[in-house]
Image (cartoon, rainbow, N blue to C red):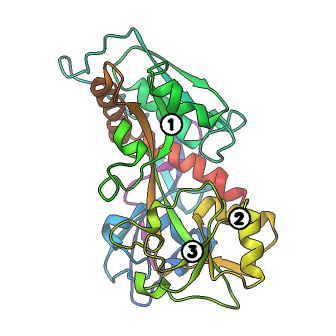
């Protein structure tokens, strides 16, 4: 295995007077013959489950199938939980703040922007989480770099009230985090018709979880036709139909929708369903909480889908386009100045430590 320090994505000690010598965490890895993402993750993170961390970071290079890494590819290896670490001192400097050039800032008539979120959506938003959760911190950092002056984030722990009436009536300016339906395939969807979507604040893998005793093959959509999948009631299902899949619309699969995630995994271990379809973090948390480690695992051949979490602005908002432009501008800025990856790495370290 060839691991080189292409760029430090994390510094293990706090900055002192702007610089510090530290061990570098993260870098690049060159794929060699026989490598798999699981093997690379086991070597670098001491945890083969973290193949998904490497895959999600390098999707544009690897493609649709995590199993198809190619010899010679240079993979970006994020820092998670202080790993992987190379010896040697580095000089670290704080990333420069990125601000909008004069004349390019969105013209906003309001003196401040009011953003809306809610809790009980770990690891993404919850007031009990570090800095309000992964997405809350990304949104907060984006707004600090959006060039709009004052802003606030309000917590209203009734998700059903957010889209209507709070956002649809512009009682608040923007809400997060929300999934984006398949607006190309279903333009009449309520969210598609009534809201603008920001660029994704974060993208996650939606995986199929199966029992080790009865694994399934998932190399193409055709492999799932005739299967029975489980996803709890109230969870989105648009990924099961988009891109011509039409698994639900055309009854190509059987979809079970019990009340809870735990119910889905009970149905899986009882043999009543072939797989549970969930985002990676919810699924892995359930495996831990239900003590199913060694019995249940995600299918690694390919993700079911990749879903972004977005900020929404109502199309009825009198300044909707400028609000959305400001949010996207701030997100671009923190990606350019390194803040985005620092936030991702820190939260991923905490999330994986709890799995």
Distance CA(mark 3)–CA(mark 1): 26 Å
Magenta segment includes 6 = yes
**Residue 19 in sight here:** no
The answer to the question of whether label 3 and label 2 lie on touching residues, with beta carbons closer than 8 A, is: no
State the image coordinates of residue 298 (x, y, percent, origin top left): 60, 76
Distance CA(mark 3)–CA(mark 2): 17 Å
Which label is found at residue 208?
3
Name the residue beneath numbered marker 2. Answer: 258
Element on which disc 1 rests: strand
Using the image, determine if residue 213 lies above or below residue 90.
below
Residue 323 placement, left or right of 265: left
Q: Looking at the image, is mark 3 or mark 2 earlier in the sequence?
A: 3
Of residues 268 and 252, which is closer to you in this image? 252
Question: Circle 3: is it few (<14), some (14-19), or many (20+) Cα within 10 Å?
Answer: many
Using the image, determine if residue 280 lies above or below residue 20.
below
Q: Which range is magenta?
A: 1-19
Residue 93: quadrant of the picture: top left
State the image coordinates of residue 90 (x, y, percent, origin top left): 46, 48
Residue 156 placement, left or right of 305: right
Query: What residue is at 58 percent from the left and 57 percent from the top?
Result: 80
Element on which disc 2 rests: loop
Question: Circle 1: is it few (<14), some (14-19), or many (20+) Cα within 10 Å?
Answer: many
Element on which disc 3 rests: strand
Name the residue beneath numbered marker 1. Answer: 176
């Amino acid at each position: 295995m060839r691991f080189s320090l292409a760029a430090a994505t994390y510094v293990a000690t706090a900055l002192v007077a702007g610089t510090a010598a530290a061990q570098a965490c993260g870098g690049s890895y060159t794929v060699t013959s026989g490598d798999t993402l699981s093997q690379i993750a086991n070597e670098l993170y001491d945890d083969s489950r973290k193949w998904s961390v490497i895959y999600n970071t390098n999707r544009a290079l690897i493609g649709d199938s995590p199993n198809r890494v190619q010899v010679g590819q240079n993979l970006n290896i994020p820092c998670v939980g202080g790993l992987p670490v190379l010896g040697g001192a580095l000089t670290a400097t704080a990333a420069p703040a990125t601000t909008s050039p004069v004349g390019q800032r969105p013209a906003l008539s309001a003196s401040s922007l009011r953003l809306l979120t809610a809790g009980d959506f770990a690891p993404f938003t919850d007031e009990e989480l570090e800095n309000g959760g992964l997405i809350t911190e990304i949104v907060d950092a984006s707004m600090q770099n959006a060039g709009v002056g004052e802003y606030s984030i309000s917590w209203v722990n009734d998700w059903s009230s957010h889209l209507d009436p709070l956002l649809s009536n512009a009682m608040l300016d923007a809400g997060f985090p929300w999934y984006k339906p398949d607006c190309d395939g279903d333009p009449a969807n309520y969210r598609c018709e009534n809201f603008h979507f920001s660029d994704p604040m974060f993208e996650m893998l939606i995986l199929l979880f199966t029992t080790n005793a009865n694994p399934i093959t998932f190399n193409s959509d055709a492999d799932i036709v005739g299967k029975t999948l489980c996803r709890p009631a109230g969870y989105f299902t648009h990924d099961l139909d988009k891109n011509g899949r039409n698994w639900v619309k055309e009854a190509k699969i059987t979809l079970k929708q019990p009340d809870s995630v735990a119910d889905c995994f009970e149905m899986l271990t009882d043999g009543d369903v072939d797989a549970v379809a969930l985002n990676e973090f919810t699924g892995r948390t359930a495996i831990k909480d239900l003590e199913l480690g060694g019995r249940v695992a995600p299918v690694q051949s390919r993700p079911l889908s990749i879903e972004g979490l977005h900020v929404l602005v109502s199309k009825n908002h009198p300044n909707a386009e400028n609000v959305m432009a400001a949010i996207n501008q701030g997100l671009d800025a923190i990606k350019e100045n390194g803040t985005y990856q620092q936030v991702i790495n820190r939260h991923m370290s905490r999330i994986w430590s709890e799995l």
